[in-house]
Image (tube, helix red, strand yellow):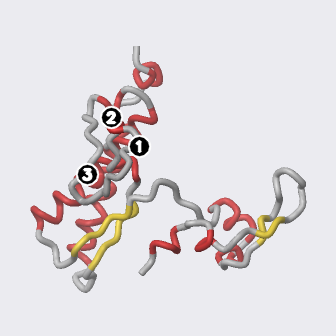
Amino acid sequence: MRLTALLGLTRQDLLDPAIIGTTGILKSIKKSAPSVKRVVITSSFAAIINPSKGNWPGHEYSEEDFNPMTQQDALESPAAGYRASKTFAEKAAWDFVEKEKPNFTISTINPPLVFGPIVRLLQRYGIENLTDNREDPLNRQSGQPQHLEPAHRRGGTRQMEG
C-alpha cells in the first residue's frame, strides 16, 4: 500500500493547489494587470530533473527538460507528490501562456535549493532581518547570536535577480 493512501492524500491534496494556484495567479495578472510584461516563477529543480538519468554529467538543462513523472507517480509518496506538483504547475504555466496569449511572458527559475530569510524569524524579530547584514537571533549550537553571510554569497534567491 502506498504511503499517500495510508495518509489519505489524493491528487487534490498534492497537485491541485500548485496547478490551480499557479494558473489562478496568471489569470488574475492577465485580467487585472495589463501593464505587467514579465512574470518570473520560482519553480524547482524537481520539475526538470529526470531521476532515471542519475546525476547526468555534462547535461545542460533547457526548457525542453521536464520531470517525466505521471500524475499516478505523484501518489507514491509525499516527496513524489511534491516533485509532481512542481512539474505539473510549471507545465500548466507554460500551457496557459500558449493558450491564453497574455500580454506578458513568463520565465521560470529552477533552483535545486533556495536560501534566504526565514519567514518565522522575520515575523518574530522584525524587518531588520531583510538586510544582507543580519544576525541569526539564536545559533542552535551555541545559543549565541551568529552572523549570517549575505544571501548572495550563499547562493540565495538574490543571486537569481536581474
Q: Residues within 10 Å of mark 1 (few under 14, many from 20)?
A: few
Q: Residue visible at 25% across and 34% down?
A: 70
Decide which of tag 3 and tag 1 comes sooner along the chain. Answer: 1
Q: Is residue 17 visible?
A: no
Residue at mark 2 to residue at mark 3: CA–CA distance: 13 Å
Name the mark nearer the viewer: 2 or 1: 1
| Amino acid under disc 2 | Ser
**Farthest front residue in view:** 58
Tell me the crowding category of disc 3: few under 14, some 14 to 19, or many 20 or more residues within 10 angstroms, Cα based: few
Nearest the eye: 6 or 144: 144
Mark 1 lies on a secondary structure that is loop
The answer to whether residue 4 is above or below residue 103 is above
Mark 2 or mark 3: which comes first in sequence? 2
The residue positioned 31% from the left and 56% from the top of the image is 61
Query: Residue 28, which numbered label?
Result: none
Callout 3: SS: loop
Residue where numbered disc 3 is placed: 65
Q: Which residue is mark 1?
A: 55
**Farthest top residue?**
1
In the picture of the structure, the residue carrying the numbered disc 2 is: 52
Instruction: List x then y, in percent, for residue 2.
Output: 40, 19
In the rendered image, which quarter contains the N terminus?
Answer: top left
- Disc 2/disc 1 C-alpha distance (Å): 9 Å
Q: Nearer the viewer, residue 161 or 38?
A: 161
- The answer to whether residue 122 is above or below residue 53 is below
Can the viewer see residue 44 in this picture?
Answer: yes
Q: Which residue is painted at 40% across and 21% down in the image?
A: 5
